[in-house]
Image: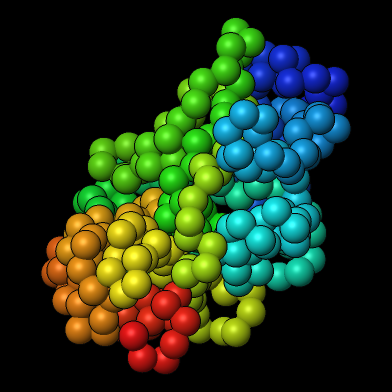
């Protein structure tokens, strides 16, 4: 690990101004991703600004709206087990508990989870080309071993997939990310616009400006709690990223789908909203046949690489299974 300056931020304004003023500085919260990257000599910040003492851990209802705000520095474990989350957003609890390990969830923060790097083994291997790590060097995964890589939204610059479980559930719940800027103002970012596809700038994982600090994630009220499910398939039963994951949430009248949200992980550079499947299901009967047709409509747009064509069929079956499970039976 290379030497760096360590600074404790006394307040959010000081933190964002410090990071905004130094292009080689980074915020330090749980450190579960950043410290790993520093140990591997992939991340090389010259200054770490410790924000763990900032007052951004609250989880509670937003006055006047009924929305739920989860603080950026609340730990993943505390968020998953909070009564308001478990009662009103069980999809989020399921997704968080499917991620990483208990030890990591006890350290990792909500804001850090959103801002972890989209990455693959070629990103970690400094002997290999990687446009995320060194823009313009190439993408070793395109012609390499790409079994775990993207089937949607990839570019010739990058085929890595976003690793978070928590964020896949959030993508299905349409939250707003609250961000403090270096001038002291606050802006709100719709979650669908927070992360980026690689296009020609794969080194940019999200749409934050330099120095901006995530302060909270605000979840809108919804009627999805009774019919939601998170499904994850991975190579190991614990401490493994998803090959494919699916978060689904439905609101129905009888057996008719009024609203549906479907998000996928392990398939793209960002949390992937399955909008083709959602559009197909809206207003239709919640039957297995319709679930299959919706899944086929979504996966028809997939562009698998040499080693990951299996994700197309896997993704289709997982969408169907997750929808069936959300409806609360083995057969819809």
Q: Does residue 225 show up? A: yes
Left or right: 151 as drawn, with respect to 223 = left
Where is residue 231 shown, x and y percent of the image? 47, 76
Left or right: 141 as drawn, with respect to 81 = left
Left or right: 11 as drawn, with respect to 326 = right
**Res 45 → quadrant:** top right
Residue projecting furthest to the bottom = 330
Where is residue 285 shown, x and y percent of the image? 23, 74
* Residue 195 to residue 75: above or below: above
* Residue 12 to residue 95: above or below: above
Left or right: 181 as drawn, with respect to 106 = left
* Residue 76 to residue 91: above or below: above
* Nearer to me, 171 or 269: 171
Disc count in the image? Answer: 0
Identity of the residue drawn at 79% across and 66% down: 103
* Quarter of the C terminus within the rendering: bottom left
Identity of the residue drawn at 32% across and 37% down: 201
Residue projecting furthest to the top = 183
* Nearer to me, 222 or 295: 222
């Amino acid at each position: 690990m290379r030497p760096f300056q360590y600074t404790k931020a006394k307040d959010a304004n000081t933190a964002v101004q410090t990071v905004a003023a130094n292009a080689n500085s980074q915020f330090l919260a749980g450190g579960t991703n950043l410290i790993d990257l520093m140990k591997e000599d992939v991340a090389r910040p010259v200054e770490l600004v410790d924000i763990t003492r900032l007052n951004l851990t609250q989880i509670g209802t937003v006055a006047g709206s009924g929305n739920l705000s989860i603080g950026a520095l609340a730990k993943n474990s505390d968020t998953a087990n909070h009564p308001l989350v478990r009662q009103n957003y069980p999809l989020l609890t399921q997704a968080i508990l499917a991620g990483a390990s208990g030890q990591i969830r006890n350290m990792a923060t909500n804001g850090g989870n959103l801002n972890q790097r989209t990455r693959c083994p070629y990103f970690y291997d400094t002997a290999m080309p990687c446009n995320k790590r060194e823009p313009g060097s190439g993408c070793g995964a395109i012609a390499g071993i790409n079994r775990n890589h993207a089937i949607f939204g990839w570019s010739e610059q990058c085929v890595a997939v976003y690793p978070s479980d928590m964020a896949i559930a959030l993508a299905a719940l349409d939250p707003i990310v609250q961000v403090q800027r270096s001038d002291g103002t606050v802006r709100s970012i719709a979650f669908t616009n927070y992360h980026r596809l690689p296009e020609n700038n794969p080194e940019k994982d999200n749409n934050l400006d330099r120095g901006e600090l995530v302060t909270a994630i605000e979840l809108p009220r919804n009627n999805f709690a009774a019919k939601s499910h998170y499904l994850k398939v991975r190579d190991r039963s614990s401490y493994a990223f998803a090959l494919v994951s699916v978060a689904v949430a439905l609101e129905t009248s009888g057996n008719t789908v009024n609203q549906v949200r479907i998000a996928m992980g392990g398939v793209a550079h960002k949390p992937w909203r399955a909008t083709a499947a959602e559009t197909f299901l809206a207003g239709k009967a919640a039957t297995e046949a319709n679930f299959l047709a919706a899944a086929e409509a979504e996966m028809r747009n997939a562009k698998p690489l040499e080693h990951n064509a299996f994700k197309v069929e896997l993704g289709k079956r997982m969408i169907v299974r997750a929808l069936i499970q959300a409806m609360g039976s083995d057969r819809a």
